[in-house]
Each structure stands twice: as structure tokens, then as C-alpha cells.
């Protein structure tokens, strides 16, 4: 398959591994930001091909994982309203809130639907004028444009039964939060290729300069990831700290201006709590006041204000440390013991981009 | 007075004309309507001497030997999908389970749970598809049952089929025969059925022209046995896909397995859809594919026989059986590394981005 097979080529992979081995002279710790990259690394065993001096650390780039418990509880509370059809992407449904997950709510009779695109949800709103369509809009900069487009279209069509429960987050503020932590040990980043496809990478140039950290915009296939690592290592060994673009087949410096304009029209930055990490200023998106009628937080403010059980993490779950790259999933005492995909304590065990799920699925549960 | 007004003034009737084309609770009530339904739809389509006796069950004479017996229920949505429908699936699925025991399928039962309000035309179409599939597979549907449930208490049609077949003497196929060193042969490309059903159910336009692989497998299996090829174990790849089938066999045989990603055929559009949705084709359902595990000495002859049949035209060797280990199934990736292929906890869910 074009754009896949050539980036999974065994000879290219071997050549890149050789290049990395030739370049590395001292130990380095590199974070891949995106959960899609984490899954590629674990699925293809790429970390096992690297010299011992390199440590790969998995980053917070799993939107499902960083969605706060309180918002999952809100989604479940809205789904239980008889007039509501709650739409979500599939892998959000198994993520535990403080009182169960959306699958559980569905089993108890809530109308929860898996959608494949925001436009599917818009179609549901048109087809069910007597129901309230609430979309659990979770994601990074990649999924913000289609949700923005859905709101713009709903506005144009005059739909009055369509709203978003927005849990959108932004990558650069999270990278800065990690870099400014006193516990930080990250010396270089693989930035998320698809996020940069939308946003470009100008904003990463400020981060690279301010924190003296090399950042390479990187794709998701084995050849992409290894080439990204080779480029970061070259910078580290040469004492450079700039933004470079490995994912040239998809990313330009300015990104997709039309998509950015759509996001700017509908959303504005806001402070956001990241699950397991805490609040990060200007790291989330919320709907602008001009589109408030499409904001489920406004539309259902009465329902959401009713005091529900307080949103709490499971005390054994250390996903915050995993998401900041401070703990490897397999070093968590709960991993594969009290925390499994059947009974997850935290989101990274069940999200398709979660680091714990990648280790459990591709490395097995016999690691202890 | 218009036609509509006329209709409105007709006296109320327990069976209004417009409902006659749908299944009603009375169709399961044991009375005249049920008898009509059975005669006009089921008996007419399945037409065979054993069914025609209209006895409580079918009876036939048995020679001494070994019988194979299996059952399965079918709840697919939508009922019709590219490459098949619930009717043909309900026949082929059970025929294939018999074939995997090394049996020649003979007779099927068919149990229907129908939802009130189901269109009789749809039912007729499904039943005719079952009859066609039964003819193609050389089996007779010789007994059956119909129940009707209230509207909203079912999902249009559920079908259960149970099958009986005869295992040729001297044939013994079972996971407990699998030994380290055996070779794993896969009959063709994987993942098409699951993606085809998903694409129509969810209206995924990008999935394009993907057809289910639903097909009867008894002929190719019968041919392998008739040619005297020594087979240790057969398993059709249904729910959970290739990954689940291999894990199940490895678990019951107490062995490990190593398979090579590069050798596992997946059609381009199926791969594309799986890449986009974040699904692993190894876990996607199939309805016309199987694995055969056999001593290495048998592989060339087995591949030659399999490739004579359209349903196994792309048969390939995908891996070998090893000593027991945990987790049992390891995949050598296309880039030359290893990863495990474990059972998933549930169904795969499409991802966010």
C-alpha cells in the first residue's frame, strides 16, 4: 500500500538503526509526544532496535487518556438524559469515569452512539429533530477542525438540537508544562505529525529556542519514527536545538491555514485540566460565546450543575506519571495486576493510543 | 370521496390489509397464520423429503461411524451486506464448523426468532438465500422452529442453525494432535467480511468495494481429506479473526506459534480501511477463511490441493508451531522484530484520530 509499505521496509529500518548507532555517543532521553507513535514503537518493537544509550519516553499525546474524569462523568450524566443521544468516537466508551464508563451507561439504557466523523453526528441531528444530539468532542488539534466545521454547518442549517461537550486539548502547552517541571528529564522531542499537519510548526520554534530542546516533527510508520529519532540524536550530539521536519510528505511550516481559520472561528483557548497531570493554562479549547448555543456545557448547564458524585481518580492509578514520561507502564505496580483492559483503573489501559494499552497488547502481561 | 377517505371509514379489523406484509405476533401463535408462514415461506424454499413429512423432527437411518454436531446463532446487522446476508451466513457458518471437524455436512435445523413488524418480503429474501446456500453446500434444512417476539424486543431476524455431518472413517482432526514443528497454512486474505459489514452498517464511504468472504469450505476440506493429506487441526476464522483462532488452538494444544506478518494476505482496500480506523486485520472477523495445521511434509501437497478451489486460491504458509510459551502466539513484524498477538478483551473499537 502506498505511503505504508515503503515506510515499513526492513532494509530502510536496518539502515536507520545503523545510522542512529553510528551517531550516538552518550545517553539521551527522547519523548515521542503522540500516542500513535507510541503504538508504532511498541507494535513494531522499534525501541528494542535502538542502542542502550537511548531512552524513549512516552508522552501525553493520547486525547482519550488526558480527558479529565469530571468530563467523562459529565458525558455519562448527559447520556442518561432521556432526550439526549450522546455521540462519541469508539475508544472513549471504555474509559472509566469515577462512576463507570459510557459502555456501562449504554447497557443501562442511555442512547450512546459511536460515530466515525462529526458529520455523522450532524446527520443524526437532522434525522432526529425531537432529540438532543450531544457530541463528546475529544481530541487534539487534529480533530478540532472537523468539529468546528460541524458547528459552522449546524449554525448554517439552523439546527437547534446539536451541541458539543468539548474536551479538546492543545499539544504545545503540554510540552511546555513537561519541560518546565522540576522533574523533567526529556532532552528531545518527536512532535506529533498529524497535529502539525493542521497547525504547522512555527509555535514549536519558540519552544525549541526557549528550552534549548531539539524538536523533530515526525510521522507514524517505523521508518518515520526511526528517522525522527536519528534527526533528534544528530541535533543532541551536535549541540543544536531547532525544529526540523521529518514528516515532509504531510507537514508544512504554516500548516493548513483553512483548518486553522475554522478552529479560530468557533473555538478559543482556555485553561484545561489534563487527567493525571493537572491544570495547564491555555491548553484547551472551548466554544466561543458567539456559538454558545452549540456548547453542551452552556446548553445543559442545569443538568451539569446538579451535584453529582465528586470526580475522583482511582488511588492506585499512576497514569499521570506515565503521561508525563516519569513512569514506564510496566513499572507501575498495578500494570497487568489490578489494572487490565477488562478492568482498567485509568484511561491509558483502554485507549487505542494509550501507552499502557500498547504494552499490554504487544508485549504481553507476563512482564512482572 | 377519495380512496384514502374510503379506507378510513372501513370498520376496524384485527388484521388490517397494510399489515399483511409484515410479521405479526400471530405468526408465532401456533395457529393458521403460523402454518401459512411455514408452508409458504419455509417449506416452499427448503423443499426436501425429510422436511415435507412435517413431523415434530426429521428422522433418517444411520450407518455405523462418527457424527459431527454443531450449532451457531446469527445476529448480523445489516441483514444484507456486500458478498452475503444473514441467510447464507447462517448456512455457511454451520457448514464450515462441521467441515472443520473433517465432516461432510448433511442436515441442518433452522430456528428463527422474528421481530413483530418485520417485512415478509425481507423474510422471504433471507429464507431464499438460505435455501440457495444449502443447495450450494449440498445440505438439507430438515427441521425448524419459528418464534415471534414483540416489536422492539428483537432485531428483525435472529437465526440459529444446528448441523449434523459424517466424518469419513480414519479421519481424526483435533487441536490435541498439533505438535511443535507443524506448519500453519492460511486459506486466503483476512479481514474482508468484518470490514464489509462495518462499512455498510456505518456508511463508511471510503471502504469502497469490499465484499464479505462468506463461503462454504466443506469442498476444499473434503478434497484435502480425500487426497490423503495428513491434517492435525482445522479452524475457521470467525469472530476475533486469525488472532483468536490461533490463540484458541495454541491454548488447547499446549503449544506456541510464530507467524510472519509479511506472509499474511490482506486485500489493499481492507488494509486501507483498517489503517484509517485503527483496526488490526488479524482481529477482524472472516466467514470463509480457515487455518490448517499439518506436518511440514504435507504442506506442498496441501497448498496444491487448496489452490485448486476458489475459496482457498490464495492459500499460503504463514508460520510454524513451537514449544509451549506464554503468551503463545508471536508475530514477526515486517520490519523484522517480534510482538505478541494476544486475545483482545472485547471487540476492537475505531479510534479517534
Image (cartoon, grey):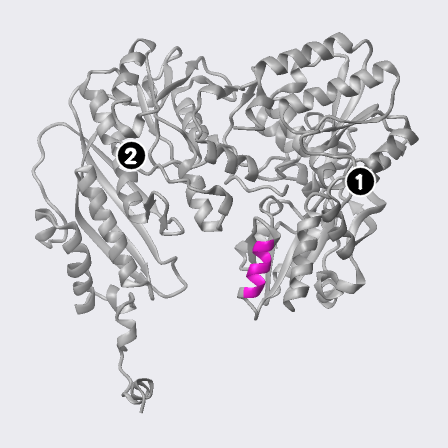
Quarter that holds the N terminus of chain B: bottom left
Residue range highlighted in magenta: A119-126
Report whether residue B20 is seen.
Answer: yes
Q: In the rendered view of the protein, which quadrant contains the C terminus of chain B? A: top right
Residue at (64, 45) in percent of width and height: A95
Q: Which mark is residue A277?
A: 1
Residue nearer the viewer, B297 or A312:
B297
Mark 2 crowd level (few <14, some 14–19, many ≥20, 10 Å Cα): many
Q: Nearer the viewer, residue B286 or B4?
A: B4
Relative to A78, residue B85 above or below:
above
Q: Main secondary structure of the magenta part?
A: helix
Q: In this figure, which residue is indicated by the disc labeled 2?
A: B97
Q: Residue at x 83, y 18 (%)?
A: A235
Nearest the viewer among B70 and B273 is: B273
Q: Are marks 2 and 1 on the same chain?
A: no
Q: Against A210, is A28 above or below?
A: above
Amino acid at each position: 500500500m502506498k505511503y505504508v509499505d515503503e515506510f515499513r521496509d526492513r532494509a530502510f529500518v536496518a539502515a536507520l538503526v545503523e545510522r542512529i548507532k553510528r551517531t550516538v555517543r552518550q545517553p539521551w532521553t527522547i519523548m515521542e509526544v503522540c500516542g500513535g507513535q507510541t503504538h508504532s514503537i511498541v507494535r513494531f518493537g522499534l525501541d528494542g532496535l535502538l542502542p542502550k544509550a537511548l531512552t524513549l519516553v512516552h508522552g501525553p499525546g493520547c486525547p482519550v487518556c488526558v480527558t479529565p474524569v469530571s468530563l467523562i462523568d459529565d458525558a455519562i450524566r448527559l447520556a442518561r438524559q432521556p432526550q439526549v443521544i450522546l455521540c462519541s468516537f469508539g475508544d472513549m466508551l471504555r474509559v472509566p469515569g469515577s462512576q463507570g464508563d459510557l459502555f456501562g451507561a449504554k447497557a443501562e439504557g442511555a442512547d450512546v452512539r459511536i460515530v466515525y466523523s462529526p458529520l455523522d453526528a450532524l446527520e443524526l441531528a437532522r434525522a432526529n429533530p425531537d432529540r438532543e444530539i450531544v457530541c463528546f468532542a475529544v481530541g487534539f488539534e487534529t480533530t478540532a477542525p472537523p468539529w468546528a466545521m460541524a458547528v459552522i454547518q449546524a449554525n448554517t442549517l439552523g439546527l437547534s438540537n446539536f451541541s458539543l461537550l468539548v474536551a479538546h486539548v492543545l499539544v504545545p502547552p503540554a510540552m511546555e508544562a513537561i519541560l518546565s517541571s522540576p522533574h523533567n528529564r526529556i532532552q528531545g522531542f518527536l512532535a506529533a505529525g498529524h497535529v502539525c499537519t493542521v497547525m504547522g510548526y512555527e509555535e514549536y520554534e519558540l519552544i525549541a529556542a526557549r528550552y534549548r530542546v531539539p524538536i523533530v516533527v515526525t510521522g507514524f510508520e517505523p521508518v518515520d519514527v526511526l528517522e525522527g529519532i536519528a534527526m533528534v540524536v544528530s541535533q543532541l550530539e551536535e549541540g543544536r536545538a531547532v525544529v526540523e521536519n521529518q514528516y515532509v510528505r504531510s507537514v508544512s511550516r504554516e500548516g493548513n491555514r483553512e483548518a486553522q481559520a475554522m478552529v479560530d472561528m468557533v473555538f478559543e483557548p482556555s485553561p484545561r485540566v489534563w487527567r493525571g497531570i493537572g491544570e495547564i493554562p491555555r491548553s484547551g479549547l472551548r466554544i466561543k460565546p458567539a456559538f454558545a448555543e452549540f456548547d453542551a456545557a452552556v446548553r445543559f448547564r442545569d443538568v451539569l450543575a446538579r451535584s453529582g458524585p465528586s470526580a475522583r481518580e482511582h488511588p492506585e492509578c499512576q497514569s499521570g506519571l506515565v503521561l508525563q514520561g516519569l513512569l514506564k507502564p510496566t513499572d507501575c505496580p498495578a500494570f497487568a495486576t489490578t489494572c487490565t483492559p477488562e478492568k482498567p483503573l485509568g484511561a491509558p489501559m483502554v485507549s487505542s493510543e494509550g501507552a499502557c494499552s500498547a504494552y499490554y497488547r504487544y508485549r504481553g502481561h507476563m512482564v512482572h | 370521496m377519495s380512496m384514502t377517505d374510503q379506507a378510513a371509514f372501513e370498520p376496524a379489523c384485527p388484521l388490517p390489509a397494510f399489515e399483511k406484509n409484515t410479521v405479526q405476533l400471530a405468526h408465532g401463535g401456533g395457529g393458521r397464520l403460523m402454518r401459512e408462514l411455514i408452508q409458504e415461506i419455509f417449506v416452499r424454499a427448503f423443499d426436501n423429503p425429510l422436511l415435507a413429512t412435517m413431523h415434530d423432527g426429521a428422522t433418517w437411518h444411520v450407518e455405523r461411524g462418527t457424527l459431527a454436531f454443531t450449532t451457531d446463532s446469527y445476529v448480523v446487522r445489516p441483514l444484507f451486506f456486500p458478498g452475503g446476508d444473514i441467510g447464507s451466513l447462517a448456512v455457511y457458518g454451520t457448514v464450515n464448523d462441521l467441515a472443520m471437524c473433517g465432516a461432510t455436512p448433511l442436515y441442518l435445523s433452522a430456528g428463527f426468532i422474528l421481530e413483530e413488524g418485520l417485512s415478509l418480503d425481507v423474510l422471504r429474501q433471507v429464507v431464499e438465500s438460505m435455501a440457495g446456500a444449502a443447495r450450494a453446500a449440498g445440505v438439507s434444512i430438515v427441521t425448524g422452529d419459528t418464534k415471534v417476539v414483540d416489536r422492539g424486543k428483537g432485531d428483525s431476524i435472529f437465526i440459529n442453525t444446528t448441523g449434523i455431518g459424517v466424518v469419513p472413517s480414519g479421519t481424526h482432526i483435533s487441536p490435541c494432535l498439533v505438535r511443535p514443528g507443524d506448519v500453519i497454512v492460511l486459506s486466503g486474505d483476512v479481514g474482508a467480511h468484518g470490514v464489509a459489514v462495518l462499512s455498510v452498517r456505518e456508511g463508511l464511504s471510503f471502504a469502497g468495494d469490499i465484499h464479505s468472504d462468506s463461503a462454504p469450505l466443506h469442498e476444499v476440506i473434503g478434497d484435502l481429506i480425500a487426497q490423503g493429506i495428513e491434517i492435525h487441526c482445522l479452524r475457521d476464522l470467525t469472530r476475533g479473526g486469525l488472532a483468536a483462532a490461533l490463540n484458541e488452538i495454541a491454548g488447547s494444544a499446549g503449544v506456541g506459534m510464530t507467524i510472519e506478518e509479511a506472509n499474511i494476505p490482506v486485500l489493499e482496500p481492507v488494509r486501507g480501511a483498517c489503517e484509517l480506523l485503527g483496526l488490526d486485520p488479524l482481529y477482524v472477523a472472516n466467514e470463509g477463511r480457515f487455518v490448517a495445521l499439518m506436518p511440514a511434509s504435507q504442506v506442498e501437497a496441501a497448498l496444491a490441493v487448496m489452490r485448486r478451489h476458489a475459496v482457498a486460491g490464495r492459500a499460503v504458509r504463514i508460520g510454524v508451531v513451537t514449544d509451549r510459551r506464554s503468551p503463545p502466539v508471536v508475530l514477526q513484524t515486517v520490519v523484522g522484530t517480534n510482538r505478541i498477538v494476544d486475545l483482545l478483551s472485547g471487540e476492537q473499537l475505531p479510534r479517534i484520530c
